Image (cartoon, rainbow, N blue to C red):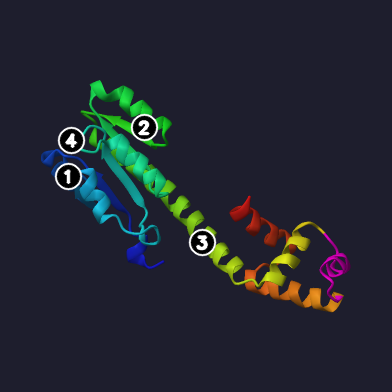
Amino acid sequence: MSAAEDTPLILVVDDDDAMRRSMQFLFASVGLDSACYAGADEFLAALPPREAQRPGALVLDVRMPGMSGLELQRRLAERDFPLPILVVTGHGDVPMAVEALKAGAYDFIEKPFQEQYLLDRVAAAIELSRETLARQTRRRTIEERLARLGRREREVLDGILAGKLNKTVAWELELSVKTVEAYRASIMAKMEAGSVAELARMVASVEG
């Protein structure tokens, strides 16, 4: 990942123009990039593919005209959106904010909020997003490696993960032991696994 791709980006979705400008100024004051959107539809239209996501957080107003913050949150969950969502709410919207938390939001912040509190929560969300993005990147890498395995290699892999000896796998697949050993070496190389234990962890992380 390049330095630019690793630079945090704070996304703000709020229909209040003054609030958007205020947040953008606040984030800029501590060196954070931000991008602001006046509504859910505008945000969804501009949303980059999952592979292009930078670490960061989404600061989301819960009550907006058109698509609400809760509906946007549901749409993002369907897309496996990786960034933590901080729901911003007025006092009367607290029940909605609690609903957002139950649906997976990272936190909710009640208006009016202390600027430092928002910055602290955003900083924590950024660190969480780095961990999430790293896991997703590793998962995609493992899936790509598995996709490179041929049919016979997958069959031998199943035998390895079941703890079977090479001669047992060879007998079940009607292959020679030397052929199974060759497939096994090819699997370890393609998966870039240093041991059977590491190989098992890789597969479990994507198929478990």
Q: Position of residue 129 (x, y in %)?
A: 41, 49
Q: Earlier in the sequence, mark 2 or mark 3?
A: 2
Q: In this view, does 92 lie above or below 192?
A: above
Disc marking residue 38 = 1
Dot 4 corresponds to which residue? 65
The residue stretch that appears in magenta: 164-176
Q: In this view, does 38 lie above or below 154?
A: above
For disc 4, the neighbor class at 10 Å (few under 14, some 14 to 19, many from 20) is: few
Q: Where is residue 77 in the image (x, y as percent from the top left)?
A: 40, 44
Dot 3 corresponds to which residue? 140
Q: Which of marks 3 and 4 is nearer the N terminus?
A: 4
User: In the shown orientation, is residue 152 left or right of residue 22?
Assistant: right
Which amino acid does the dot numbered 2 rest on?
Ala
For disc 3, the neighbor class at 10 Å (few under 14, some 14 to 19, many from 20) is: few
Q: Earlier in the sequence, mark 3 or mark 1?
A: 1
Q: In this view, does 177 lie above or below 22?
A: below
Q: In this view, does 53 lie above or below 156?
A: above
**Marks 2 and 3: CB-CB under 8 Å?**
no
Name the front one of labels 2 and 4. 4
Of residue 14 and residue 71, the one placed in the foreground of this image is 71
Of residue 203 and residue 21, the one placed in the foreground of this image is 203
Alpha carbon distance from label 2 to label 4:
17 Å
Dot 2 corresponds to which residue? 100
Residue 173 highlighted magenta (yes or no):
yes
**Marks 2 and 4: CB-CB under 8 Å?**
no
Alpha carbon distance from label 2 to label 3:
28 Å
Name the front one of labels 3 and 4. 4
Alpha carbon distance from label 2 to label 1:
20 Å
Q: Which residue is drawn at 22% across and 52% down?
A: 35
